[in-house]
Image (spheres, rainbow, N blue to C red):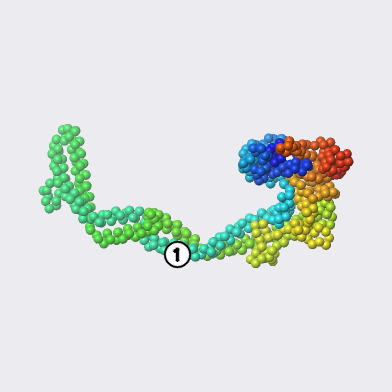
């Protein structure tokens, strides 16, 4: 990992060991910036105050070895990251994060720019950060419950997933019931309006296109005299008056013209063609004359029919004003309204069905809750025993831990095994870590039952036990050994070294007893030019490591006595590793 422009660190490269890496250094040298850099790399909150004075930006770049088929590898690939193969089922992934002095933050993953949240998502599968802030969060009952659930593994995870799915389904059913029952008046009013409107439409029984047909009929009836006079006059012009057969008319004139051509039409084809067209005109005029006569006979002034048509048009217009604007829209509204009314009128049946569904869902939820609670109780006993064992090795031989899993009885709660208890999205249980620091002492919440030094050891024991069940490959501990010293400090180092046999462990520490157990030790060194402090990180060889441990022990890195003590610590740690 490379850090530039972050806090007191100007430019530093961290070469982390596959096993246990200890990060040490004098107070103010910037050890915490190492953890801050790791936090930024995995989506932590950025702050422009982290940028080194005089620098435009702070940046952190890390090279990770991951399995491309793992959850983290798949998530990175989905985000557009590219990998560099480094062996069978392994690949190198580059992550970078920068924060400008103005507070703008950018992130990239495998060469692709990504949202900061993508890095945070990877952290869940790649690294577990344990530090002072994590200690504070572990004092919260909700965080303690989450820790216990992760420690329990599938015994809680599987029934809890079923519980959450059933809980969500129950909430949806209850929301639907709430809507149906609390909005009963509004729904009844809606149903009444629909019944009224549907009755109006049903009474008139409109037909698609009827309004256009009625409009045409009203136009004819309203102008019957005009139409009859016009058609009669046109018929008389074509066929003549029946009272005067000798009157001149179009048909007689055309017939006379045809007779005039009759004798000569056989002598010239051109004239024959004209005569034929004249014959056709005669036939056409005769047809039109017949139609005009029939039309004139059919036209009658019918005031009653006209009134009926106009009333029908008025009624249809009223429907279209309310449910239109077109008659087709009225018919569509009627169809949809009938379906909606059926739905509203079926509310009583729906309420009864939903009530039955709610009862069944609560019964199923109670079964899942009981299994979750049983899994937690079993895990709590094991977790408490494991932490108590760790405390005995951390110079608290008489301390005891208990993790009660309790429920709160409330009216209207969930009926679980004969009790009515409160329930929520995570089940029915309250979980709290309690400590009795010595025989005869009552069990109290760990925030109240432990002194400052005891709390650090309790939280470290909890962290180590919890970390041992965590599937992530890398653990980072930021001075969780604060307030610990002497033999307890040796046990802290021993436990971190044992954890490092199955995972990568990075520890920021001020204790030489802890640092001695590391496979690799890095020191954060600072130089001061009188203006700005600059820190860098170097890997210590054996001789440098002895001097650094001597400084941590006695404050004098060249002290022969201090170096002899450092050698003793290193030899003891090496012997412990050999014993396995």
Residue in front for this viewpoint, 236 or 27: 27
Q: Nearer the viewer, residue 320 or 476?
A: 476
The quarter of the displayed image where residue 446 is located: bottom right
Q: Position of residue 265 (x, y in %)?
A: 16, 35
Residue at x 86% of width, y 43% of height: 569
Which residue is more in the foreground, 261 or 472?
A: 472
- In-image side of 344 versus 142 (left or right): left
- Residue 225 as seen in the image, left or right of residue 527: left
Q: Quadrant of the N terminus?
A: top right
* Camera-nearest residue between 461 and 275: 461
Residue 226 x, y percent position in the rendering? 21, 53
Residue that label 1 marks:
192
Residue 338 percent coordinates (x, y): 45, 60
- Could you tell me which residue is drawn at 83 percent across and 54 percent down? 396
Placement of 283 over or under 191, stated as above or below:
above
Circle 1 crowding by C-alpha within 10 Å: few under 14, some 14–19, many from 20: few
């Amino acid at each position: 990992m490379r850090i530039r422009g972050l806090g007191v660190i100007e430019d530093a490269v961290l070469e982390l060991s596959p096993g246990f890496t200890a990060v040490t250094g004098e107070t103010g040298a910037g050890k915490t910036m190492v953890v801050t850099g790791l936090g930024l790399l995995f989506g932590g909150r950025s702050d422009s105050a982290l940028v080194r004075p005089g620098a435009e930006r702070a940046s952190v770049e890390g090279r990770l070895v991951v399995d491309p088929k793992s959850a983290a590898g798949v998530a990175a690939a989905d985000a557009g990251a590219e990998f560099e193969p480094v062996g069978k089922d392994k690949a190198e992934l580059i992550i970078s994060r920068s924060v400008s002095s103005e507070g703008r933050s950018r992130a990239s993953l495998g060469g692709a720019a990504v949202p900061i949240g993508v890095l945070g998502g990877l952290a869940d599968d790649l690294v577990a950060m344990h530090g002072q802030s994590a200690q504070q969060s572990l004092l919260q009952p909700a965080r303690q419950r989450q820790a216990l659930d992760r420690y329990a593994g599938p015994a809680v995870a599987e029934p809890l997933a079923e519980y959450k799915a059933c809980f969500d389904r129950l909430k949806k059913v209850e929301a639907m019931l709430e809507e149906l029952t609390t909005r009963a008046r509004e729904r009844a009013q809606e149903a009444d309006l629909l019944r009224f409107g549907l009755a109006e439409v049903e009474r008139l029984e409109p037909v698609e296109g009827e309004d256009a047909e009625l409009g045409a009929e009203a136009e004819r009836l309203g102008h019957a005299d005009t139409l009859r006079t016009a058609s009669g006059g046109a018929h008389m012009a074509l066929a003549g008056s029946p009272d005067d057969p000798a009157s001149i008319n179009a048909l007689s004139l055309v017939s006379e013209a045809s007779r005039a051509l009759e004798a000569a039409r056989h002598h010239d084809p051109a004239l024959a063609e004209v005569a034929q067209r004249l014959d056709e005109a005669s036939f056409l005029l005769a047809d039109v004359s017949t139609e005009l006569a029939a039309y004139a006979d059919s036209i009658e002034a019918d005031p009653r029919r006209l009134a009926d048509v106009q009333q029908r048009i008025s009624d249809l217009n009223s429907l279209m004003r309310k449910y239109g604007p077109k008659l087709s829209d009225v018919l569509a509204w009627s169809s949809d309204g009938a379906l909606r009314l059926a739905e509203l009128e079926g509310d009583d049946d729906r309420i009864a069905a939903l009530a039955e569904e709610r009862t069944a869902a609560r019964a199923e939820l109670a079964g899942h809750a009981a299994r979750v609670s049983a899994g937690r109780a079993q895990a709590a006993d094991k977790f408490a025993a494991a932490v108590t064992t760790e405390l005995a090795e951390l110079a608290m031989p008489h301390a005891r831990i208990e993790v009660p899993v309790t429920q709160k009885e409330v009216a209207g709660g969930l009926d679980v095994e004969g009790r009515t208890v409160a329930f929520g999205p995570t089940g029915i249980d309250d979980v709290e870590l309690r400590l009795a620091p010595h025989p005869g002492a009552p069990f109290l919440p760990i925030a109240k039952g432990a002194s400052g030094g005891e709390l650090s050891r309790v939280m470290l024991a909890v962290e180590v036990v919890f970390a041992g069940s965590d599937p992530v490959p890398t653990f980072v501990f930021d001075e969780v050994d604060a307030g610990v010293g002497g033999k307890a400090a040796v046990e802290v180092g021993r436990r971190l070294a044992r954890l490092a046999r199955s995972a990568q462990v990075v520890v920021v520490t001020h204790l030489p007893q802890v640092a001695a157990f590391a496979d690799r030790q890095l020191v954060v060194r600072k130089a001061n030019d009188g203006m700005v402090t600059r820190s860098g990180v170097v890997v210590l060889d054996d001789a440098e490591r002895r001097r650094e441990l001597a400084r941590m022990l006695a404050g004098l890195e060249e002290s022969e006595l201090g170096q002899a003590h450092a050698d003793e610590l290193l030899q003891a740690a090496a012997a412990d590793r050999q014993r396995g």
